[in-house]
Amino acid sequence: MSKTTASIRSATSSRRLRQPSRLAACVVGLSLLPLGVGSTAFAATTSGLYHHGARVLLPIGGGYEENALSGFSTVTAQQATGKTVDILVVPSSYGDAPEDRDANLALARERTSQIDAICDATVAASPSLRRSFTGCNATLLVLLNRADAMDPRNSTAFDSALTDGAFILGGDQNLAMTILANSPAEKAMARAYRRGVVISGTSAGAAVQSRSMTAGYSDDGYAENGLEKDSPLIWWGDDSDAERGLSFGSRRTIFDQHFYQRGRFGRLLNLTAQSVPRTPGGLVGVGVDYATGVTDIDDQKLTTIVGDSSVAILDYGTTRVAPTWVGPKQTLTARNVLTHLQAPGTGMTYDLTRRLPIVDGRPVRLPDRAGRATPKITTSARATLLLGGGDNADGSAAVMKRFAQIAGKGSSQRVVIIAAGYADVTAARADAKTYRDALAATGRTDLGQVLIKVHGVDRINAKTVKGAAGVILIGGGQSEIGGAVSDRAFATAVKASARDSAVVMTDGAMTAAMGTRYATDADPDENTLEDEAVRDFRAGNAELQPGFDVVSDATLEPRLTRDYRWGRLFDAARPHPSTLSVGVSELTALELGHGRARVVGDRSVTTLDARYARFLSASNGTFGMINGLISTFGPGQRI
């Protein structure tokens, strides 16, 4: 939510001065950044979707990217009157520290100039808009602190008949509402919204557009543990008249921002589950990604998607088992949360009143037989499998302790640790030694020798694991594990260990390879994490290859929550909807054995059941989906 985050790209270079807009006396002089708009297809896709005077919210999930702002400009133009498209810019998310006021105003001027420039370019690029408008006027209002918001003179422009749209800048939504709640500025915005002024905003400016507003994470909360009940914070709007989103914000949804980019599926699944006791079926979760926006019409329908990505819709209304929170950290366990991905060019809208996706004017309902049970995860292994999501090389970790508990005394009294999928042999041996030390730290001292083998250097076949008390298989990277999967001798060793050992533990990329198929995408690092998380929701981004098929009819994805790999679950299901997508969080394992599947460890296992889903091709390279079913399982829960 930081206004200076490097992931938000500024518009560039040359500037020209623009005269202040005629909309208000309380404005700040602007400098304009002339940007070109590569293509403006939004006029055609939005025309006719809105009745004049419709109440329109348009949350954008983050950034000031050209396509999203061009979409906002076109939607606003559809509602506009007069010869120009007139937009007010609200900077309240920047905060109220007096020492930062000058810097905040400077940045707000820059953002206002970007909005103005892209709106002008959008009008110029569209023949239909050029016939109606001469251009755009973006005006920055001085609403940086509570005193500004309480002075009615600073928000009179909202009551002007010339005003067509408003844009709330990104920053901190909690600060924004501390400044705006119950102020003349908020009341003026509400009057403007009710008469048809388009209300938009990015990041924090998107979050404030739902009455129940995401308020970040607690001190111990982050994306990795977003499914833990107390990890995310929310202002419900009924606890305090000030702790809420905008007074006129959506009452049917919770808007979340930077959704794919920052791995926030867990957070929104959690918050919408917590809303179930408050309203029948809970509020509808609407996750809006970076550089992407969705239009909410009269709080009844989600229509046009603008920008680069798609929007996730989460609905507990059809779940037949109430969500619960289990384990020491109160991790969400929820069954069959109806999930849709709304993308541009698919003909899809979403009816918030009936909770129904609509495609080309026709509702698409979940079949009556669906949602009764998550498909069983099956395995050919006779061994107990501990399919780890990564980071389980710790003697105090529940997964390693479980391995030590199950490991038996083989004829040769040894444990075999095998590393594969590493570009560097030294790194492979170092990781294997870490697992060896972690096993020793569990206190299990009667297992005998611990043998370390590295694929590509050491000879590995069925004899390597014969008689082992237990086998640990670790993988360096999913893009590098292919050589081991295609190595017949190595595959024989894997299947022999699953057949003959008491327990086989996998971690990282080796967990992925145990399924029917696995994604060969390179593992993200701290520099690529957010970009990869967004890219995972683009059609065909997941390159799938056959795995060992020890776990049948399943695609396994480790490090689900830490590496924001939610998109891989969907993209893997798209070409193979009958194959269950299974995401295993780090510090966690899926235990399979003796006819049961359950969660071991600190976090969660998530499944995507796409048997009843319909996938749609989008116009921006992403994909849409209707009627997928997401389930989450906390520690100790059976799947």
Image (tube, helix red, strand yellow):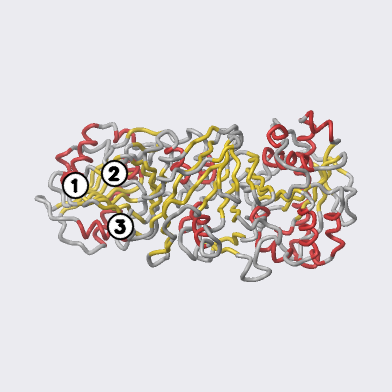
On screen, residue 272 versus residue 209, left or right, reads left
* Residue plotted at (26% across, 32% down): 487
- Seen from the viewer's position, the closer of residues 260 and 356 is 356
Residue 435 drawn at (x, y percent)? 29, 53
Residue 207, above or below 499: below
Marks 1 and 3 sit apart, C-alpha to C-alpha, by 19 Å
- Seen from the viewer's position, the closer of residues 507 and 581 is 581
Marks 2 and 3 sit apart, C-alpha to C-alpha, by 18 Å
On screen, residue 421 versus residue 219, left or right, reads left
Residue at numbered disc 1: 382
For marks 2 and 1 on the same chain, the one whose residue lies earlier in the sequence: 1
Residue at numbered disc 3: 399
Q: Is residue 66 visible?
A: yes
Q: What residue type is labelled 2?
A: Ala
* Residue plotted at (47% across, 46% down): 566
Determine whether the residue tagged by mark 2 lies in a helix, strand or loop: strand
For marks 1 and 3 on the same chain, the one whose residue lies earlier in the sequence: 1
Residue at numbered disc 2: 419
Residue 113 drawn at (x, y percent)? 78, 45
Q: Which amino acid does label 1 sit on?
A: Arg
Q: Nearer the viewer, mark 1 or mark 3?
A: 1
